[in-house]
Image (cartoon, grey):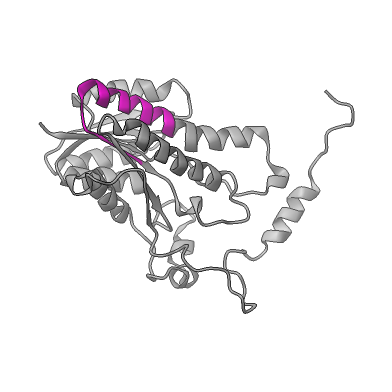
Amino acid sequence: MNKTAVVTGGSHNIGQGIAIALAERGYDVAITYNKRLEGALETKEAVEKFGRKCFIYQASLEKPEVPDKVLAKAYRDLGHIDLMVCNAGNGGFRGSVLTVTPEKVDEVYTVNFRNYMLCAGAAARYMVKDKVAGCILFITSSRAEGVYPDDYLYGGFKACVSRACESMALDLSAYNIRVNCVAPGAIWTIKPGMEDRLTSPFVRESIPLHRVGTARDIGDMCAFLASDQASYVTGITVRVDGGLILPAMMESGEKIPWVRDGWREQIAGEFAEWKYPEEGAD
C-alpha cells in the first residue's frame, strides 16, 4: 500500500519543497493552497513526474470549520493518511506590543496555532480509525527559540506549537503515532522584496554555515522524520537553520545584530500615534 501525506500550504516555498521530497520517496500527496493556484498546479506537476498522485484543495485554514473538511477530502482521495504536515501559516507580522490590537492577535493565532491543532486532530482521528502508525509534523520556526524584540506574536505562537507537540506526542503514543516539529531558520523564498535580504552578505555572514536554507533542506528533514529510520523519534523539535540561533549576545560592546537599523525610531513613531481609550468608557 502506498504511503500518503497531507501537506498544508503546498503551493510554494517550504510546503512545495516538502511535497516534492515526499513524492520522490514514493508518497501520494494532497496539498492545500490559499491563493496560489498556479503554484499548487506546479507542485502537482512536479509530484506527478515521480509517478505519484497529487490532489489539490483551496482552503482558508484560518476558518475553524475548514481543517475537518479538508482532511475529509484528503482521506477520501488518498484512501488513508500516513503523514500530516502542518505547514501553512504566515510569518509576516513584526511589531511592538505597545501597538498590538485584538484583531492582530486573533489573526496570528488562527493562522499559526489553531489551524495546526485542528489539522493535526483531524488527521490523527483518521490514523486511529485505520490503526495507522502515522506521523504528524509541525513546521515551526527557529524564532520559537531565538528571541527578537518585535516577534512576540509569531514567535510566541510557534513556541506554543512546539510545546503542544510534546504533549501530543505523549497523547498519541498509545496509537503508535509520532509527533515532531521541524524549525526552519532563514529559508530562501521567492516572495517579492525578500531576495536582497536573503542573499545579502549580512545574512550569509550571520549564519554559521554561511548560506540561507532551501525548501529542499526542510523537505529532506520532513521525509527523514516520517520514515522508518526515525521510528524511535517523537516529541522533539529539529532546527534546520544552519546554526542561525546558536550565537549568544556579544559582551564586548559590539553591535547586536538582531537590532535592525531604525527599529527604535520606527516603534517610537508608531507609538506616538497611539490613541488611549477615554476614561470611563465601557
Left or right: where does residue 265 sit relative to residue 17? right
Q: Quadrant of the C terminus?
A: top right
Q: Quadrant of residue 52?
A: top left
Residue sitting at 44 percent across and 20 percent down?
A: 65
Expressed as whole percent of the image width and height from the top left, the position of residue 204 reads 43, 70
Prevailing secondary structure class for the magenta stretch in the rendered image: helix
Left or right: where does residue 238 sit relative to residue 252? left
Residue sitting at 89 percent across and 27 percent down?
A: 280
Residue sitting at 40 percent across and 56 percent down?
A: 187
Residue 122 within the segment the image draws in magenta: yes
Q: Which residues are magenta?
A: 116-137
Q: Nearer the viewer, residue 157 or 17?
A: 157
Please say if 228 is above or below 54.
below
Q: Is residue 76 visible?
A: no
Expressed as whole percent of the image width and height from the top left, the position of residue 54 reads 21, 34
Number of numbered labels in the structure image: 0
